[in-house]
Image (tube, grey):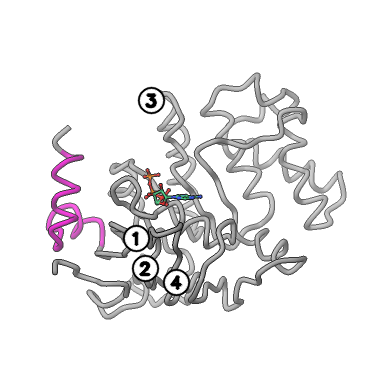
Amino acid sequence: MDDVNPGQADRTTGETVAPDRTGGAREPMVVIEGVNKHFGDLHVLQDINLTVGKGEVVVVLGPSGSGKSTLCRAINRLETIESGTISIDGKALPEEGKALAQLRADVGMVFQSFNLFSHKTIRENVTLGPIKVRKKSKAEASTQADALLERVGVSAQADKYPAQLSGGQQQRVAIARSLAMGPKVMLFDEPTSALDPEMVNEVLDVMVGLAKEGMTMIVVTHEMGFARKAADRVVFMADGQVVEVATPEEFFTAPKSARAKDFLGKILTH
Ligand SMILES: Nc1ncnc2c1ncn2[C@@H]1O[C@H](COP(=O)(O)OP(=O)(O)OP(=O)(O)O)[C@@H](O)[C@H]1O
């Protein structure tokens, strides 16, 4: 039994979340308790417990098929769960309906595939949600979109269509689109995996900027440089379980579980 942290995110440190960068305590933002899910016979999420604090950046690492994406999608109710609870800023995730749409607006999600609306301009992609869900006026949403597009470095593309942009630019638009909803937490599910290598850093730089500004982030990625640089804590998953939770320094220099050692041995030697 090599699990350092079977199912309970805070047993290693005794803290439910990492302290903030001044050493202060954080309020919980995302609380995941006793979450289970199966796909047929596969127990893909096994009694997952994890608390992510406000402004905390948690990077989820683990071998392919360990349940990282499923966990991310469950936090946004894109996947149902069989048992357990997930709450965002003190509110339990509702099952469906208007309340779910509102709560989802608080949880931005950026996927591997950018999922932009192909027949809408870049600016329209960013204004749509704020107008429909946040009930902003068109003018207000447009001003905000232009500021966000500037922030992620694609303002010159505002009147173009997604297919006219590079993958890295499209992914930065996807981030701007999520930010336009004023999310309380951002989920990133392998946001750079579909990008050509030269575009990876332009997206990671935007994410590092967000982390520095205090956005609460849960990031599933294979980018170890990002994990080292930006994560407050690393959550290592294997076979549907949270196996280890540690600071990046602890995780990369002295992983405690055999499965994490094996994982790091495989990825860091290539
Ligand atoms: N909709 C589904 N139906 C059935 N099985 C699924 C479904 N989605 C995922 N799985 C299975 O659940 C397991 C966990 O998948 P998941 O995508 O969460 O893993 P992951 O850790 O994110 O992997 P990767 O790093 O390869 O993206 C895998 O074995 C996968 O094949």
Q: CA distance from mark 4 to mark 1?
A: 11 Å
Q: Mark 2 near mark 1, Cβ–Cβ under 8 Å?
A: yes
x, y percent for residue 201: 40, 32
Q: Which residue is rendered at x = 59% and y = 30% of the image? A: 170
Q: Nearer the viewer's eye, disc 3 or disc 1?
A: 1
As displayed, is residue 176 above or below residue 1? above
Residue 87 placed where, x, y %? 55, 74
Residue at 38 percent across and 25 percent down: it is 197
Label 2: which secondary element: strand
- The numbered disc on residue 205 is none
- The amino acid on which the numbered mark 4 sits, given as a three-letter code, is Val
Precedes in sequence: disc 4 or disc 3: 4
Q: Is residue 132 positioned above or below 163 on the image?
A: below
Q: Which residue is mark 1?
A: 240
Distance, label 4 to label 3, CA atoms, is 35 Å
Count neighbours of disc 1 (C-alpha within 10 A) and say few if under 14, some if 14 to 19, many if 20 or more.
Answer: many
Q: Dividing the image into 4 quarters, which one contains the N terminus?
A: bottom left
What residue span does the magenta drawing correspond to? Answer: 247-268
Disc 3, disc 1: CB below 8 Å? no
- Dot 1 falls on a residue whose secondary structure is loop
Residue 46, label in figure:
2
Tag in front: 4 or 3: 4
* Residue count near mark 2 (Cα–Cα under 10 Å), binned few <14, some 14–19, many ≥20: many
Three-letter residue code for mark 3: Pro
Depth check, mark 2 against mark 3: the one in front is 2
Say which residue label 3 marks.
197
Q: Nearer the viewer, residue 27 or 146?
A: 27
User: What secondary structure is marked by label 3?
Assistant: helix
* Sequence-first tag of 3 and 1: 3
Q: Is mark 1 within 8 Å of ligand 1?
A: yes
